[in-house]
Structures are given as C-alpha cells and as structure tokens.
Image (cartoon, rainbow, N blue to C red):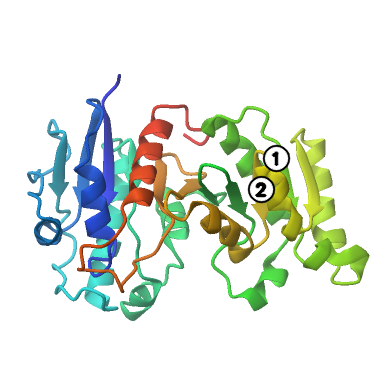
C-alpha cells in the first residue's frame, strides 16, 4: 500500500491529549503508516515518562524520509510551563501552533491526514485566540467556506447544522441554507465512510418537531423548505423528524446518518452510544482531519488514567479515509 504520513497534534499540553496521542501512536501499526507526533519535544518526553515508555525519535523536518514514528517540534511558540489540569494561555498558544503547523503540512502534501488532540477553548480565549474550535480554525486555514462537523461511532453518524453556539442563539442562526449545506455534506460523506445509499434523517428543532406549529414554526418555515430543496437535488432525505424518535430509527437501520440542528441535540445521543470510540471528522477540507470525541479532561491529566480508545479510533479512521478518494480534495 502507498505510504501514509499522519500527523497527530498534542492538543493542550495540560490536558490528556499528549498521553492519549502517544498511547495510540505506540500501538502496533500497519507498515505503510508513518506517524508524526506534532508538539514540543518536552511535551512528548513528559508524556512518555508518565506512561513508562520511550518517546519516538525526533525529526527536524517532514521533507526527509520518515521513520515509522517520530516527533516533530514546529518551533512556532515557546514551550509551555507544565501545569497538568490547569487552564493556561501558554498551553493554548502552544496548541494553536501545533494546529497551524499540522494544517500547513497537510496543505503542502507532507501529511495525508491530521488527527488533533483536544484543545481548551477557555485557554484559547485567555491567549487572545478567537477561534471557536478546531473545525472553524481548520476551515479558515484551508480557505474553505462550506464545511461541517461530523461525529460518528460504530452505530451512529451525525452532522450538525449549527456548531459552537450558545443555545439561545441557535434558532436565529438556523437557516434553510445551513440545513441544505449540512445535508449535502452528509450525503457526500456517507459514501466516503462506506454507506452508498446515503439515507439521511433530519431532526426537527423543537419538541415533537414543532407539533404542527404549536411548539414553534422553524420546522415549517425553515427545515421543511430546505428539505424540499434537498429532494429536488436528488438526496435521499426524510424529515423534519422529532429528535426524541429519530435516533431510535437511525439505530434500527432506517437512516445511514442524521442531521441535527444544534450541538447537544446530536452529540448527546452520539456520546451516549460511542463515548469510548467516537470520532470527530471535519467535512469539506481538502485533507483528512479527525479527532477523538472528548475534551481535555483536565481532571485526568497527568494521572496516567486516560483512555486512548477514541484517539485510536480517530487515528485508524484518518488512515482509512486518507486511502480513499476525499470528496473535497
């Protein structure tokens, strides 16, 4: 098979990212994979001591032939002061530098895929970094304007119509164009993941999908017109369906994926079913980007207790998808 170089960022150095990333990378890997752990060398050495392992060798740059595993320090920010479990601006600046370097390496073809360990949005704000999350940051770096956040596990696949918004702002932000774009992204992603029929169910926004207007009219004024546009474009889509029913139907095999209207509407069911093995996939990028479905877990940082299962799944899916035709490449 063709050699695949996959970058894995350390995420926030004060969280569990370095631990789970290193644990995943040190597992047995297929011979065609080349894993590049992106972060300050000190961060990886500290994580290696924590888990009682030896860190992979360091590479000075990605233009040289890569070993099976290596670390790469992009040298774009000062090394952070180690403070496991703490929200710190220096850690955020380091995590930000890792993302910038990984994205640049993917865009210039040095990396076939990027797996990102979790960042802390509060720390980003402390550092003056105004990005709402990985998804929006990577889309900006790649110069794309149509993108989506997809999360999936063994039994469930969800795309969000709105992402990192306070709940009180969701209804105002929900437009027909946003729903159509989410459906389009999911319709293109499902065959990439192996679901050729791409049957899509779409959630309502309100309880009981609005109950005919008694509990809100977004279903009639926004979502239903959007789905009519989707059907005219040939996508296999049903809805709007009450959110308290659609995920049962999805698990029963009626749909291959679901479009949720807001963050917790989709991620609550997804994490309940797949918290240990869930994967976050950014749709719309010209390169593959995945991440585990959890956060920095500051309460576990530095304690050698973090479960790497979601990071392992994110790494395996990154390699799998990088070997297939990217719909947005």
Q: Is residue 185 visible?
A: yes
Q: In this view, does 118 lie above or below 227?
A: below
Lateral position of residue 253 relative to residue 150, left or right:
right
Q: Kindly indicate the quadrant of the structure image that contains residue 126.
A: bottom left
Give x and y (percent) for residue 52: 10, 55
Lateral position of residue 210 relative to residue 65, left or right:
right
Give x and y (percent) for residue 182: 65, 49
Q: Name the residue under label 1.
A: 255
Q: Kindly indicate the quadrant of the structure image that contains residue 253.
A: top right
Callout 2 crowding tier (Cα within 10 Å): few <14, some 14–19, many ≥20: many
Residue at the location (70% across, 40% down)? 255
Q: Are marks 1 and 2 in contact (CB under 8 Å)?
A: yes
Q: What element carries label 1?
A: loop
Q: Kindly indicate the quadrant of the structure image that contains residue 244.
A: bottom right
* Foreground of the two, 131 or 108: 131
Residue at the location (30% across, 55% down)? 100
């Amino acid at each position: 098979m063709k050699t695949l170089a996959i970058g894995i960022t350390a995420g926030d150095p004060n969280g569990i990212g370095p631990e789970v990333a290193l644990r995943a990378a040190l597992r047995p890997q297929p011979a065609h994979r080349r894993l590049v752990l992106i972060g300050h060398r000190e961060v990886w050495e500290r994580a290696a001591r924590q888990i009682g392992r030896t860190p992979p060798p360091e590479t000075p740059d990605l233009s040289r032939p890569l070993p099976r595993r290596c670390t790469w320090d992009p040298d774009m920010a000062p090394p952070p002061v180690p403070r496991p479990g703490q929200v710190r601006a220096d850690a955020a600046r380091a995590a930000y530098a890792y993302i910038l370097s990984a994205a640049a390496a993917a865009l210039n073809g040095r990396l076939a895929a990027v797996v990102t360990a979790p960042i802390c949005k509060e720390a980003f704000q402390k550092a003056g970094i105004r990005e709402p999350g990985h998804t929006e940051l990577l889309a900006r770096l790649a110069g794309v304007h149509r993108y989506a956040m997809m999360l999936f596990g063994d039994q469930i696949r969800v795309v969000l119509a709105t992402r990192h918004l306070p709940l009180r702002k969701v209804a105002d932000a929900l437009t027909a164009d946003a729903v159509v774009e989410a459906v389009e992204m999911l319709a293109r992603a499902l065959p990439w993941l192996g679901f050729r029929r791409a049957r899509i169910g779409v959630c309502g926004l309100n309880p009981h999908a609005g109950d005919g207007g008694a509990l809100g009219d977004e279903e009639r004024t926004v979502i239903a017109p959007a789905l009519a546009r989707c059907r005219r474009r040939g996508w296999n889509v049903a809805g709007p369906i009450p959110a308290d029913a659609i995920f049962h139907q999805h698990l029963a095999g009626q749909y291959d994926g679901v479009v949720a209207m807001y963050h917790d509407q989709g991620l609550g069911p997804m994490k309940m079913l797949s918290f240990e093995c869930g994967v976050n996939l950014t749709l719309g990028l010209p390169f593959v980007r995945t991440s585990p479905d959890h956060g920095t877990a500051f309460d576990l940082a530095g304690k050698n207790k973090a479960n790497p299962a979601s990071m392992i799944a994110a790494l395996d899916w990154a390699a799998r998808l990088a070997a297939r035709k990217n719909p947005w490449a």
